[in-house]
Image: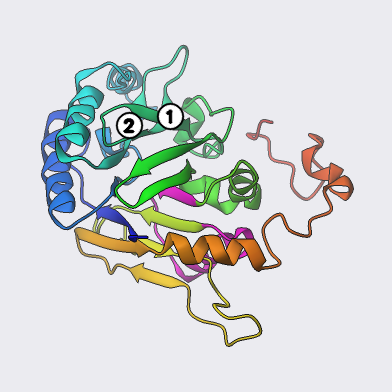
Amino acid sequence: MPQLHIALLQLASHGADLAANLEKGEAFCRRAAAQGADIALFPEMWSIGYTFFNPETPGDQERWNALAVGSDDPFVTHFRALARELGIAIALTYLERWPGRPRNTVSVIDRRGEILLTYAKVHTCEFDVERHCTPGDGFPVATLETAAGPVQVGCMICFDREFPESARILMLNGAEIILVPNACGLDAHRLMQFRTRAFENMVGLAMANYAAPQHNGHSIAVDAVAYPEIDGEPRDTLIVEAGEAEGIYLAPFDLERLRAYREREAFGDAYRRPRLYGRLVETTVHPPFIRSDATR
């Protein structure tokens, strides 16, 4: 089976300029397709370059809200047409218009230009300006048809990856590959945490971050095949890790090897005991984790 190639689009944005970000995003998608990508993955909230408003500036929040787009608006339909033209999938990120407060969203557009799934960030950063976004309410997984064959994909966005439950529920929902748009500094701890999500769930993970100086790059892709042979020596699961520079970082995933590994290894859902995990879904929070700005 051919390998699945995911292009991590590590870009610097034009701030809140939708037209400029659309133009640049198209150019990089074309380059990714020319390099053999099956999926092009944008960093978080690409439509407006993950910019927010100043609460102290009158009218600034209204201006920011007006930048939100719907799935039928030109910003999204342009990339749908582009995916169809190029014959690749595009994981497009944008501030999504939504009743009340907008959402921080990624839509996976298939190579026919259809929106396969739309995921809104569940773990919005309530300790920051993302408290003005509506959180998502689920972790959908869908079958994406690619030149490498069908693959089960899901998404999580930035802060979502810091909660083990996000990748775990995606795995339980059937995900083989998880696409992760990002917009923050990626230090050694976050990168190690990211690799752990792949290892413990036996899923492939691909994350696209903003280039420096907007953030610090280090877009990364890892597979889960830590032990390629039964009772054999472990291997490094890193596929690619970028530096800080803008560019396209192509990550090949061997789906056949990943699936064989998931059939035989001990992680993922193989030996879990969920009847003992009831506390995980309780909503009461106990010290020292009580935060005045957190909601459930």
Q: Circle 2 sits in a helix, a strand or a loop, which is it?
A: strand
Quadrant including the N terminus: bottom left
217 left or right of 260 in image: left
Residue 29: x, y in percent?
Answer: 18, 45
Q: CB of mark 1 within 8 Å of CB of mark 2?
A: no
Residue at left offset 51%, top offset 24%: 134
Look at the image and say whether residue 198 sits in the magenta stretch: yes
Pick the residue in front: 232 or 119.
232
Q: Which residues are magenta?
A: 177-203
Residue at left offset 85%, top offset 42%: 278
Q: How many marks?
A: 2
Tell me if residue 114 comes above or below residue 186 in the rendering. above
Q: Residues within 10 Å of mark 1 (few under 14, many from 20)?
A: many
Tag 1: amino acid: Thr
Way the structure is coloured = rainbow
105 left or right of 8 in image: right
Look at the image and say whether residue 71 sits in the magenta stretch: no
Which residue carries the number 1 mark? 118
What is the spatial separation of the Cα atoms under label 1 and label 2, in whole angstroms? 11 Å
Residue 210: x, y in percent?
Answer: 29, 52
Residue 247: x, y in percent?
Answer: 19, 59
Tell me if residue 69 comes above or below residue 111 in the rendering. above
Q: Which mark is residue 94?
A: 2
Q: Nearer the viewer, mark 1 or mark 2?
A: 1
Residue at left offset 41%, top offset 56%: 206
Pick the residue in front: 31 or 292.
31
Task: Say which quarter of the image contains residue 255.
Answer: bottom left
Q: Circle 1 sits in a helix, a strand or a loop, which is it?
A: strand
Pick the residue in front: 24 or 65.
24
Tag 2: amino acid: Tyr
In the rendered image, is residue 136 in sight? Answer: yes
Q: Which mark is residue 185?
A: none
